[in-house]
């Protein structure tokens, strides 16, 4: 469904992504794990065209989407939940959801928009209770749910999730991941999940990539990565000595 | 007519209101573009002048009715705003705020030059919308045109609140201003929103020019001072805050008129700038701006 071939990206003069290649099949949950500054977020931003790609190709359903504009990609079915819960703080929860459904509103009108919002309320009941509150006043977990709901309002086939667990309590992380699994069951959503919280991510993912300084260093089934010595040491916090004893 | 202390005071207030409403409209124009792009549009004063001059030509030159000329002049300047964005702002490869500001200065000089060629250097007169016989209230006089100005400002403020809070297009413009990336990810075309912001603020500038022309007599070079005052008001009210602009506009207008009346009319223009300086010293984010937000902005 999604295929990155030798993608290169720069921040000014810093070479961030170095010939990065990865793919996501339809219906799969794939996770990209790595340390701070490894290029995880830049990978997602490159896919959704928020960050310019210099060299390499990105394909979506075999169409070359490398240099398409972000709103085109949203229209084609790629939605991204950006890092750090980037919702519209000074607006109400309902307004936020409406904006998430901007394209639905433009193509299918008000009724479809309302139906979409109601679906999100069913998926995240807490948002219904908070619908008149300003998004900036929500708790971290609620904000993350709102951010995901906004992305889902665009009715994506592929969801790019950037660190949904950042700064959240483990219980809430669990809840969010449960919803993602549920969505895959229900509507066959495909997910590319970027995470620092490697153990949680690998538990729900089918497959995983490990990224280090802009390069993919390991690709394997999620279960295999959970057992991988190198991954255990670097990303799962197991002590070397413990592993060897 | 008797001119007691209170009557004088009331007269100055009326005069201040009239000026203040115009400043508020100009400032709102600055705010729309500022919110969408972070840019101060130095051609805002020229939008005002073009609106006024076009109105003069259509009413006295072509003999159109006021309502019709009003609509055409506003539309004309709105189109100029759109052209400005499409031809000078949109094609810029790396649109840094400073580059765009310099471009708006260039456009302002260009528009001023073109206006001078078309309308000449003289002042242009236009009759008041509905007679120039003033009403007398407690000894002070107020022109019907002043009531028009206050009324039109009111209508525009209401239209603004409705547009930015209740319509999808207005909400998506706000969304773009709040968080550009997140707005793009919702499928909003940010470049179109920038164009829309230029269209809106050109239209609002035109309205300001149209309603003020009967009182001040428009000429091609008026834009600089009007723009400067409007910019000052926008800063005093907190850049990007349109309701703040309205309150600050009226405040500055009234203070100007009072100082003109009680101190000396020579210092009237200086007063506005003095207020601007004081606000920048004491509250750099403006009277109604949030200091937290201003720390994140480029100015």
Image (cartoon, grey):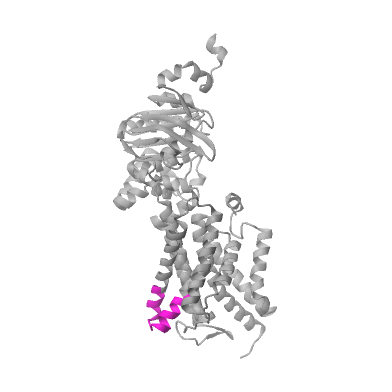
The quarter holding residue A219 reads top left
A57 left or right, relative to B225: left
Does the magenta portion include B54? yes
How many numbered discs, if any? 0
Give the answer, above or below, for where A42 lies relative to A208: below
Taking the view exactly as shown, the residue that stands out farthest to the right is B263
Quadrant where the C terminus of chain B lies? Answer: bottom right
Does A125 sit above or below residue B100?
above
Of residue A57 and residue B18, the one placed in the foreground of this image is: A57
Observer-nearest residue: B110 or B147? B110
Is residue A96 in view?
yes
Provide residue A40's location: percent of width, then percent of height.
48, 32
Question: Residue visible at 42% across and 84% down?
Answer: B60
Residue A3 x %, y %: 36, 32
Dominant secondary structure, magenta: helix
Quadrant for the N terminus of chain B, please.
Answer: bottom right
Expressed as whole percent of the image width and height from the top left, the position of residue A212 reads 50, 27
Q: Answer above or below: position of B132 versus A169.
A: below
Can residue A148 be spotted in the picture? no
Q: Is residue A195 left or right of residue A181?
A: right
Q: Does residue B12 lie above or below B97 as drawn?
A: below
Q: Nearer the viewer, residue B96 or B252?
A: B96
Query: Residue A218 colored magenta?
Result: no
Judged from this view, the residue extending furthest toward the top is A245
Give the magenta range: B52-72
Horizontal side of residue B130 vs B287, given as left or right: left
Residue at left 42%, top 63%?
B83
Q: Nearer the viewer, residue B63 or B243?
A: B63
Residue B59, how many percent across, how many down?
Answer: 41, 82
Q: What is the residue that sits farthest to the bottom in this orientation?
A: B1
């Amino acid at each position: 469904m999604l295929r990155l071939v030798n993608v290169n990206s720069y921040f000014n003069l810093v070479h961030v992504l170095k010939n990065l290649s990865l793919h996501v099949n339809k219906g799969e949950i794939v996770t990209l794990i790595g340390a701070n500054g490894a290029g995880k977020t830049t990978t997602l931003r490159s896919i959704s065209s928020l960050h310019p790609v210099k060299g390499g190709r990105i394909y979506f359903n075999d169409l070359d989407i490398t240099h398409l504009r972000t709103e085109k990609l949203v229209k084609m079915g790629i939605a991204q939940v950006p890092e750090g819960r980037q919702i519209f703080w000074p607006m109400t929860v309902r307004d936020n959801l409406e904006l998430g459904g901007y394209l639905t509103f433009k193509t299918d009108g008000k009724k479809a928009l309302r139906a979409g919002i109601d679906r999100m309320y069913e998926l995240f009941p807490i948002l219904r209770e908070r619908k008149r509150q300003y998004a900036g006043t929500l708790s971290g977990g609620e904000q993350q749910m709102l951010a995901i709901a906004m992305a889902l309002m665009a009715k994506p086939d592929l969801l790019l999730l950037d660190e949904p667990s950042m700064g959240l309590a483990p219980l809430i992380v669990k809840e969010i991941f449960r919803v993602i699994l549920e969505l895959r069951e229900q509507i066959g959503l495909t997910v590319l999940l970027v995470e620092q919280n490697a153990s949680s991510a690998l538990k729900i993912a089918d497959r995983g990539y490990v990224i280090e300084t802009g390069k993919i260093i390991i690709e394997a089934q999620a279960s295999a990565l959970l057992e991988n010595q190198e991954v255990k040491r670097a990303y799962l916090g197991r002590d070397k000595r413990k592993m060897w004893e | 007519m008797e001119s007691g202390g209170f009557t004088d005071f009331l007269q100055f207030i009326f005069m201040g209101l009239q000026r203040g409403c115009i400043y508020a409209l100009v400032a709102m124009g600055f705010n729309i573009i500022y919110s969408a792009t972070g840019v101060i549009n130095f051609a805002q004063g020229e939008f005002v002048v073009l609106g006024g001059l076009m109105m003069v030509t259509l009413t006295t030159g072509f003999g159109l009715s006021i309502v019709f000329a009003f609509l055409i002049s506003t539309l004309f300047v709105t189109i100029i705003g759109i052209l400005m964005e499409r031809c000078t702002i949109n094609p810029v490869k790396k649109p840094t705020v400073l580059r765009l500001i310099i471009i708006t200065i260039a456009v302002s000089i260009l528009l001023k030059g073109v206006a001078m060629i078309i309308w000449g250097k003289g002042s242009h007169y236009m009759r008041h919308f509905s007679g120039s016989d003033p009403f007398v209230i407690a000894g002070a006089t107020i022109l019907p045109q002043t009531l028009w100005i206050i009324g039109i400002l009111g209508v525009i403020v209401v239209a603004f609140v409705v547009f930015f809070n209740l319509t999808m297009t207005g909400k998506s413009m706000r969304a773009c201003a709040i968080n550009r990336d997140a707005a793009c990810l919702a499928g909003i075309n940010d470049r179109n929103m920038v164009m829309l912001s230029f269209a809106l603020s050109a239209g609002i500038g035109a309205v300001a020019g149209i309603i003020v022309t009967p009182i001040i007599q428009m000429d091609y070079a008026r834009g600089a001072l009007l723009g400067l005052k409007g910019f000052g008001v926008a800063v005093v009210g907190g850049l990007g805050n349109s309701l703040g602009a309205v309150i600050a506009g009226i405040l500055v207008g009234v203070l100007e008129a009072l100082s003109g009346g009680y101190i000396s009319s020579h210092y009237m223009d200086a007063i506005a700038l003095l207020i601007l300086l004081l606000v920048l010293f004491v509250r750099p984010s403006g009277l109604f701006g949030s200091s937290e937000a201003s720390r994140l902005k480029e100015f």
